[in-house]
Image (cartoon, rainbow, N blue to C red):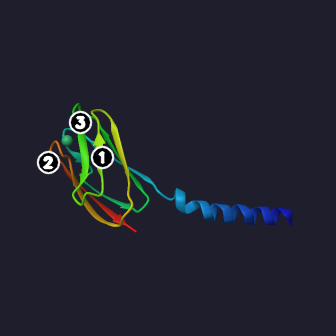
Amino acid sequence: MVFRMDRLAILTAVGLIAPAMAGETIRVTINKLKFDSPQVSAHVGDTIEWASSDFVAHTATARNKDWDVAIPAKGVGHVMLKHAGDVDYFCRFHPSMTGRISVAP
Ligand SMILES: [Cu+2]
């Protein structure tokens, strides 16, 4: 009986905690002035991590102005996705660098 109650308590706790921990991290690499992959799918609560191997700084700037992430040379930048929908983004320093994130609810 005690075991069973503990098990229920654990399942309940997992259920309560799960929504806050549901997000995945999706990595988009940057190489030679390109977002690789330029198109990714994600869910609200996921984090996009851009990891650059370039020697120059970049940004990931949402066209809808939701976010503007600085990505230093040889560095990383992150954003947590808060809204569903397709977001087109670009690099402010190199406007030909473009990408899109399709965010499902
Ligand atoms: Cu750039």
> Crowding at label 3, few (<14), some or many (≥20) Cα neighbours within 10 Å?
some
Q: Which residue is mark 1?
A: 69
Tell which residue pokes out farthest to the right in this image.
1
Q: Which residue is mark 2?
A: 95
**Mark nearer the N terminus (1 vs 3):** 3
- Secondary structure under tag 3 reads loop
Q: Residue at x 85, y 63 (%)?
A: 2
Q: Residue at x 30, y 32 (%)?
A: 74
**Mark nearer the N terminus (1 vs 2):** 1
Q: Any mark on residue 57, and which?
A: 3
Specify the quadrant that holds the N terminus: bottom right
Amino acid bearing label 2: Pro
> Crowding at label 1, few (<14), some or many (≥20) Cα neighbours within 10 Å?
some
Q: Separation of disc 1 and disc 3 at Cα?
A: 11 Å
* Count of picture labels: 3
Q: Residue at x 27, y 51 (%)?
A: 37
Q: Quadrant of ligand 1?
A: top left
Q: Nearer the viewer, residue 27 or 94?
A: 94
The reply to whether the residue tagged 2 has its Cβ within 8 angstroms of ligand 1 is no
Where does the image place residue 18, in percent across and percent down from the top left? 57, 61
Q: Quadrant of residue 88?
A: bottom left
- Secondary structure under tag 1 reads strand
Q: Are marks 2 and 3 in contact (CB under 8 Å)?
A: no
Q: Nearer the viewer, residue 30 or 63?
A: 63
Q: Quadrant of residue 102?
A: bottom left
> Crowding at label 2, few (<14), some or many (≥20) Cα neighbours within 10 Å?
few
